[in-house]
Image: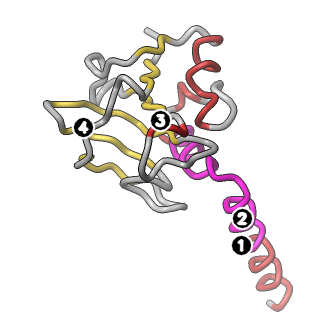
Amino acid sequence: MGKAVTLLIAVLVFCVTATAARADSGCVQGVHATLSWTSTIKGNAVDWPAAARKLGFTVDHSSGACTSSKPCVVAYPPSYGSGIDKTYGHVAVLYSCSGSSCMIGDQNGICGTATTFKKCSSAKTINFSSASVIHPKS
């Protein structure tokens, strides 16, 4: 029993340290776990729009085609503003927008914690002229 507890503690310390060392790991992991079609998009959140384009995904600044049954990814650049990591940016699942309210899901951001992905209505209007939207392939 002592070895199992020691191993568990070692794993927890490693996970916490690994997450803290990379500012993008929580949000990127949350999107990858939620949307299987994003598994080929690699890199930090800031790299996602260019990486997605290279893989043939449509990347634009429009949320119109994003729905609960066909969610997109919203990628916030480091320069986006308050609450966005200044080095790595941020990615979240974009389910839909109606008026100035958007339904998103993320980890380590507006809705979720560093280890938990959650869905919520964004009280903050998303500036789509700055943020990129990555659409799933048809």
Closer to the observer: label 1 or label 4?
4
Query: What's the CA distance linking mark 1 and mark 2?
Result: 5 Å
Query: What's the CA distance linking mark 4 and mark 3?
Result: 14 Å
Task: Give the secondary structure at mark 2.
Answer: helix
- Please, is residue 59 above or below residue 1 in the view? above
The residue that disc 3 covers is: 76
Badge 4 density bin: few <14, some 14–19, many ≥20, Cα 10 Å: some
The residue that disc 1 covers is: 12
Query: What's the CA distance linking mark 1 and mark 4?
Result: 34 Å
Task: Give the secondary structure at mark 3.
Answer: strand
The residue that disc 4 covers is: 102
Closer to the observer: label 3 or label 1?
3
The residue type indicated by label 1 comes to Leu
Give me the residue at 52% from left, 42% from top: 90
The residue that disc 2 covers is: 15
Instruction: List x then y, in percent, for residue 113.
Output: 46, 62
- Dot 4 or dot 2, earlier in sequence: 2
Give me the residue at 47% from left, 35% from top: 76
Instruction: List x then y, in percent, for residue 52.
Output: 59, 18
Give me the residue at 43% from left, 31% from top: 74
Badge 3 density bin: few <14, some 14–19, many ≥20, Cα 10 Å: many
Q: Which residues are magenta?
A: 12-33
Closer to the observer: label 4 or label 2?
4
Disc 4 to disc 3: CB gap under 8 Å: no
Instruction: List x then y, in percent, for residue 79.
Output: 51, 38
Disc 1 to disc 2: CB gap under 8 Å: yes
- Please, is residue 19 above or below residue 132 in the view? below
The residue type indicated by label 3 comes to Tyr
Closer to the observer: label 3 or label 2?
3
The residue type indicated by label 4 comes to Cys
- Dot 3 or dot 1, earlier in sequence: 1
Q: Nearer the viewer, residue 112 or 62?
A: 62
